[in-house]
Amino acid sequence: MTQKTYTLTELETKANDIRSDIIKMLETAGSGHSAGPLGLADIFTALYFSVMNYDPKNPDWDERDMLVLSNGHTAPVLYTAMAHAGYFDRKELSTLRKFGSRLQGHPERDLLPGIETTSGPLGCGLSQAAGMALAMRMNKDLRRWVYVVMGDGELNEGNIWEAAMLVGKERLHNVIGIIDRNNIQIDGQTEDVMPLEDLRGKWESFGWHVIDIDGNDIEAVIDACTMAKAIVEKPTMIIAHTVPGKGVDFMEYDFRWHGIPPNHEQAKEALKDLRTLGGKIRSEHD
Amino acid sequence: MTDLHLTDYFAKDAALEPTRKGFGRGLLEAGKRDERVVAACADLTDSTQMSLFKEAFPERFVEIGIAEQNLVTVGSGLAAMGKIPFVSSYAAFSPGRNWEQIRTTICLNDRPVKIVGSHAGLYTGADGATHQMLEDISLMRVLPNMVVVVPGDAVEAEKATLALAADSRPGYLRLAREATPTLTTDKTPFEIGKAYVFAEGTDVTICATGVMTYHALLAREKLAKDGISAEVVHVPTIKPLDDATILASVAKTGAVVTVEEAQIAGGLGGAVAELLVENHPAPLRRVGVKDRFGQSGAPDELLAHYGLKAPDIVLAAHDVTGRK
């Protein structure tokens, strides 16, 4: 399906709208994760409004690209991007984490069309992406890609490296991994909890092409995905360096915002930050 | 009673074959019938008998290496694209090691991945306790959406494999390493969710699963000499349990013995106990492994040591009939 083409400015505005919706839905939910979804907003904007091929009116379309959200706790950014992409009405975002909602605390495939897999327990996404890519190879689907978004903290999981070996061995070039390298996990900084560096060297040694980017630069995300699709010798891992809590000054860089939502006052403050976004979008005084 | 076309299993020249061999044939046939059937294995392709499929359909087979967490999650990804994946290893490792991945990415995700656990139970023999998986039935039975099948012989294992391939649910197939007597024939019916009365009786119901059904039949012969008429119900599907067949038998006999080469906690014994307590309380004894680990030895020695042989079943049957 051919999607509408957006200008970069439109995409940046879209990312900001997604961030605002994330803050609102988290405040209403009263629980959930703030830092990761805000940091991932630019990546999801790039994926849903430039990179991926899909049809929100036909979520099971058999030519669509697949998106596996491995770190399911960042569901708010997935739900918000899906709502903006037309999978469901944005009003439903306010049901996040409520009884009877299709927007579960962690994504559930059978509840919400457009979600490709149930996730939350960490470390399982890359393996599923590998299975999807293997099936595509068996089916000779040459024009489909599997995008898998992972947190950096979840790279502590052994399952990830089992999958890294397999994808490297099988040269599943239509797997495009994106690591949200925001350097935080629940107990603190990733390099204190369980060091990941040399992260680039690790993936390269497993047979992957690695691209480091500024994950909060939408154009860089799009360019890296374009490059990844052109590389057919091996799979590509995009290490997307992001700022946790991006766009909300008092949340940025602070690991304590990993697993909590803003209260009413904090949400007001956050939305004010997002309206100005460093003065780039529009000033509070306008 | 309908003719189940069983073999003459007590004959001196009765056939012996491991259930895993039947699986290997069944998977090959399933692959021929449906091109969506694919397979993945964790470095045990010959042992689990997946090799037949691999040779016939190399492009539909994935060698995962020794990585059981990856094995089942790759299976989930294959199923996401419309495949029907069979993923195999030893039961001690899959589903032993990767339970949470099975729970989330297969059961909650509702993907029709078929987990094949070979070398399960005491019949694994000399490898010892680490490899004698006794908790797999319990582990798989508690998972919503999961079907649990424990075939009684190689012929039934072949049919069970084909039935699982045609079933839309996640499944677990438990297989044994050693050759055991073939009880059934090509004509014997098999359906997921059905239990079968292999031998009728009036005094006690013996519910047996997997390769233990043969031992239950042996016990029935001995009980007959003691004047006790035992009905042997073969229960190849632990989940969904065939409540109707089991309850109908118990309504007739009023006493029950369960037999399995697995932990009785949560296994067939647990399943039947739950069924009886809620529907038709009756004296029950569970023959199986009782909260212990196995050890190295010949299967026959181990069955005797852990109290799983025909004389143990006979004693249990006397106990429950005496308590009626």
Image (cartoon, helix red, strand yellow):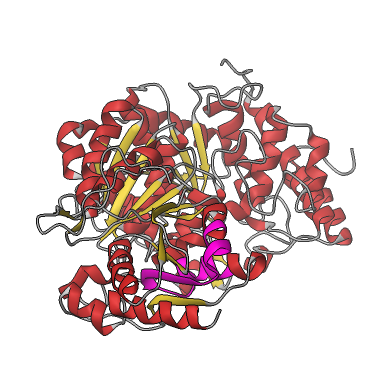
x, y percent for residue A219: 54, 33
Whether residue A40 is situated above or below residue B304 in the rendered picture: above
Would residue A42 be found to the left or right of residue B146 on screen? right
Q: Is residue B250 on the magenta stretch?
A: yes
Q: Quadrant of residue A13?
A: top right
Question: Would residue B221 be visible to someone looking at this image?
Answer: yes
User: Who is closer to the viewer here, B29 or B81?
Assistant: B29
Task: Tell me the magenta residue range.
Answer: B248-274
x, y percent for residue B63: 23, 46
Q: Quadrant of residue B235?
A: bottom left
What residue lies at 90% left-to-right and 42% top-to-bottom? A285
Whether residue A235 is situated above or below residue A145 in the rendered picture: below
Question: Would residue A241 be visible to someone looking at this image?
Answer: no
What residue lies at 43% left-to-right and 70% top-to-bottom? B258
Furthest-top residue in view?
A2
x, y percent for residue A277: 74, 45
Whether residue B47 is situated above or below residue B289 in the rendered picture: above
Would residue A28 be found to the left or right of residue B239 on screen? right
What residue lies at 67% left-to-right and 41% top-to-bottom? A111
State which quarter of the image contains the C terminus of chain A. Answer: top right
Q: Is residue B272 on the magenta stretch?
A: yes
User: Who is closer to the viewer here, B202 or A136?
Assistant: B202
Furthest-left residue in view?
B13
Would residue A252 be found to the left or right of residue B40 on screen? right
x, y percent for residue A203: 32, 52
User: Who is closer to the viewer here, B161 or A76?
Assistant: B161
Would residue B286 be found to the left or right of residue B94 on screen? right
